[in-house]
Amino acid sequence: MLHGKENIMVILSSPSGVGKTTLTKKIQQKYKNFKISVSHTTRTPRSNEVDGVDYHFVSKKKFKELIDEKKFYEHAKIFENYYGTLKKYVDETIKENDILFDIDWQGTKQLSKYTNLNLIKIYLITNKAELKSRLIKRNQNTDEEIKKRFNSFDEDILHWNDYDYIIINKNLENCFRQIEKIIEINKITPNISFQKTQ
């Protein structure tokens, strides 16, 4: 178990299909103090997803009410659906645990505005050919959804400079080891000056 004076918030972002959800789960399995931030979303659950575990699935009407009430630290519209992180969950969880966010660049920009949050921002990337292969292999999206996600790649990678660390995910285990090092450095020496890494 890592021991740090401050609990940290780790953001993992990437274009769709790069592997951040798998890596998020691996981090939580190794570091028991990490809690995954469970986002609210308006998209339809996939067959293997559980409400309250993978996401909080809500209607667009309910989501917009939460926006109007300023309940979110961050929210974004991605591929016709909304995603958001509730302030209440984050504020309560960070008292006892580290938090892991699986969010995109839009959410990262919004969270970064809150200077009181101890954020470690990691961006995962792969090449476009590998990305397309992964999107097809995972068999979770329609052909139209794969096309949209693939086409958004160029827009997504324009925002890499908003992050503290950049990791090229050529191999999942190597990528995970790099994330481990980043977590351990920031737990042992919080608020250090960040350096880009690959």
Image: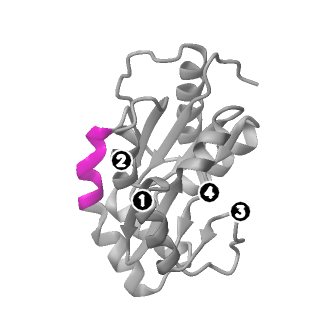
Q: Residues within 10 Å of mark 4 (few under 14, many from 20)?
A: many
Q: How many marks?
A: 4
Q: Please tell me the numbered disc located at residue 47.
A: none
Residue 66 rendering spot, x and y as whole percentages: 49, 65
Q: Which residues are magenta?
A: 155-162
Dot 4: element: loop
For label 1, the residue is: 75
Position in image of residue 177 (x %, y %): 59, 34
Label 1 element class: strand
User: Mark 4 sits on what residue?
Assistant: 38
Callout 3: few (<14), some (14-19), or many (20+) C-alpha neighbours within 10 Å? few
Q: Earlier in the sequence, mark 3 or mark 1?
A: 3
Q: Can you say which quadrant of the picture contains the C terminus?
A: top left
Q: Are marks 2 and 1 in contact (CB under 8 Å)?
A: yes
Does residue 27 appear left or right of residue 193 in this picture?
right
Q: Gap between marks 2 and 4, in whole Å?
A: 17 Å
Q: Earlier in the sequence, mark 2 or mark 4?
A: 4
Q: Quadrant of residue 77?
A: bottom left
Q: Which residue is mark 2?
A: 110
Q: Residue at x 72, y 32 (%)?
A: 96
In contact (CB < 8 Å): disc 4 and disc 3: yes
